[in-house]
Amino acid sequence: MALENLLTPECVILDLKETDRKEVVLEMIGHLREVGKVPSGDCYCCGNAVLEHESNAGTGLGSGVAIPHARVPSLKETVVVFGRSKEGVDFDSPDNAPSRLICLLLVPEDKAAKHLQLLAELAKIFSQSEMRENLEKAETAEEVCDLLFGACPV
């Protein structure tokens, strides 16, 4: 399944409120719950899975990007939420820069290959400096999706 089938404008947060890594992860999962992508009963499990992964290895890629992610046993389908932080969030990036562009990825436990494929696709997209600049300037959720989908092969 391609990124354009997973990320919809309703799954874009243009201005994350939180600035602490744990709180940002919980804010993003809460948003997924609000838009009906993650059942309320799965939020705790999703949050724990991502935060456990974060405690073992930071998910900051550098250049202001982080991709917090986890495989979640109770999840039925892959979900993605994109968030932008004006202040930036410490996701233990190799360059020690705060992450302003954050893409949270939750994948069912039995979809390990899909998990790795999506991580690779996102890393490739975010490796482009022009893409990062455009995502920072985007004014609407639709514009964010258009930028990301334009970078993805159909």
Image: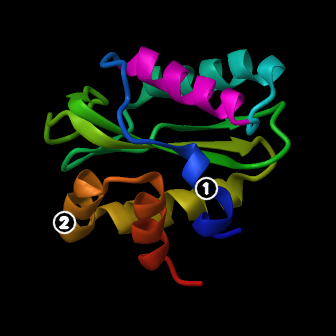
Q: What element carries label 2?
A: helix
Q: Which mark is residue 78?
A: none
The image position of residue 45, as x and y in percent, is: 72, 20
Question: Crowding near pointer 2: few (<14 within 10 Å), some, many (20+)?
Answer: few
What secondary structure is the stretch in magenta mostly built from?
helix
The single residue placed furthest to the bottom in the displayed view is: 154
Identify which residue is drawn at 63% across, 54% down: 115
Give me the disc on residue 129: 2
The colouring scheme, among rainbow, by chain, secondary structure or one colour, is: rainbow
**Viewer-nearest residue: 72 or 23:** 23
x, y percentage for residue 126? Answer: 33, 61
Q: In this view, does 113 lie to the left or right of 81?
A: right
Estimate the spatial distance between the alpha carbons at disc 2 and disc 1, rounded to whole Å.
Answer: 23 Å
**Residue beneath the point at 53% across and 29% down:** 28
Specify the quadrant of the image occupied by residue 85. top left
- Of tags 2 and 1, which is closer to the observer? 1
**Which segment is the magenta one?**
21-35
Residue 25 colored magenta?
A: yes
- Name the N-terminal-most of marks 2 and 1: 1
In the image, residue 9 sits, relative to residue 22, either above or below, namely: below
Question: Could you tell whether 62 is left or right of 39 in the image?
Answer: left
The residue singled out by tag 1 in the image is 8
Residue at the spot 18% in from the left edge and 65% down from the top edge: 129
| Residue extending furthest toward the front | 139
Q: Nearer the viewer, residue 19 or 137?
A: 137
Q: In which quarter of the image is residue 40?
A: top right
Q: Where is residue 111 in the image (x, y as percent from the top left)?
A: 76, 53
Q: Does the magenta stretch include residue 90?
A: no
Residue type pointed to by label 2: Ser
Q: What element carries label 1?
A: loop
